[in-house]
Image (tube, grey):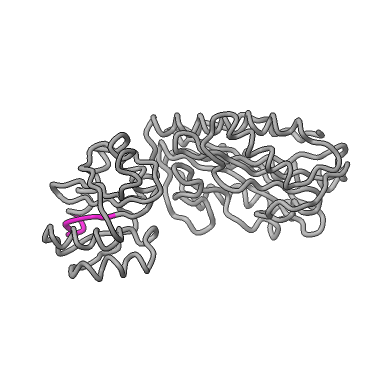
Amino acid sequence: MHKAIAKIREGLQCAGCEAFFSLSPPANEYLTGFHGSTSAVIITGSLAQFLCDFRYTEQAKEQVQGYIVEEIQGTLETRVGERLQTLGITRTAFDPLTLTVFQKDTVQKAYPGLLIPLPDLLADLRMTKTNEEIEKIRNASQTAEAALGKMLHHLTSGITEWELAAHLEFEFKRAGAQKSAFDPIVLFGTRSSLPHGMPSNKELSPGDIILIDCGCVVDGYCSDLTRTYVFGRIPGAWFEEIYQVTRTAQEAARQVIAADAVCREVDAVARNIIGEAGYGSYFGHGLGHGVGLEVHEPPRLNMQSDTVLTAGMVVTAEPGIYLPGRGGVRIEDLLVVTENGCETLTRLPKELQVL
């Protein structure tokens, strides 16, 4: 946290700002170690202050490191504005990607100075993970994989997507996770063509595709994985084909993920393989994204991103092919970028499995 404070101060100096404030729970957790849902952080050249209300004071004093903890009353945004004014700050930076218009306006009502959007100030810091952060993500990934393995024992004809998703979330908690990183995606049969479909009362039948996208939170950090199975029997040669194309594309992308690789060029490796197989129009999302305190973080591995990967970034590689009315495939691994390649955190097999 102390290194992050120093980096924020360097960024403020370069931008000609005197202070930075944040109301974002994930950002504040990154900066301070605080796991609560409501807080504010103010950083100046000489001050690092953490504000919270009575509900979190005791917790903050146990968790927050490197900051003066102060209990406040009333609207948090108003107190931040008042504090900035009291400190005599004239130019204050904020992250426009995490602050709502309402929050900004409320701070501004109590603060006559300038609010300067600096979207990269904190995002650039959070993209590259420390060894400690990587170990937490590794633990979350291992926990999710173990829970998924246990959940698959509940597979039986007639079980619904909702029921299987509930079993998965239960297994996360039983394995020690704080919560799911996002609502699990559990889709059967033709519904597997919905890239981000939500579970329904669809019942499992022999020959159904089973697409599961899930992750959990352990010690504040997220995991993310996707596997696609079939139940009872393979629905047809068409499915075996798109499964193999997806797997080949994912492996090819994994081979080029390394420090100094450009995100859009990594995306293109997988996209070209899927396109050459005739399924380009059925792969409409980006190849992957960063993972950390939030399950979707920068960098983005997509067709537009010029971000250059650096060692320590944690990203997903998750190509997919989705055929409307028939079914889909997605295979997703969690990867740590290294100087010479990448380390794959996800250990689940990727061969097509009939369950």
Quadrant in which the N terminus appears: top left
Quadrant in which the C terminus appears: top right
Q: Quadrant of residue 349?
A: top right
Q: Is residue 175 left or right of residue 130?
A: right
Q: Is 288 situated above or below 231? A: below
x, y percentage for residue 101? 37, 68
Q: Disc count in the image? A: 0
Does the magenta segment cover residue 246?
Answer: no
Q: Is residue 82 left or right of residue 273?
A: left
x, y percentage for residue 256? 53, 40
x, y percentage for residue 137? 48, 34
Does the magenta segment cover residue 19?
Answer: yes
The residue located at (58%, 40%) in the rendering is 215
Quick one: 17 or 285, which is closer to the camera?
17
The residue located at (48%, 46%) in the rendering is 290
Quick one: 94 or 83, which is closer to the camera?
83
Q: Is 225 situated above or below 124? A: above
Quick one: 328 or 257, which is closer to the camera?
328
x, y percentage for residue 328? 75, 50
The residue located at (39%, 58%) in the rendering is 98
Quick one: 121 or 266, which is closer to the camera?
121
Q: Quadrant of residue 64?
A: top left
Q: Is residue 286 left or right of residue 201?
A: left
Q: Which residues are magenta?
A: 14-21
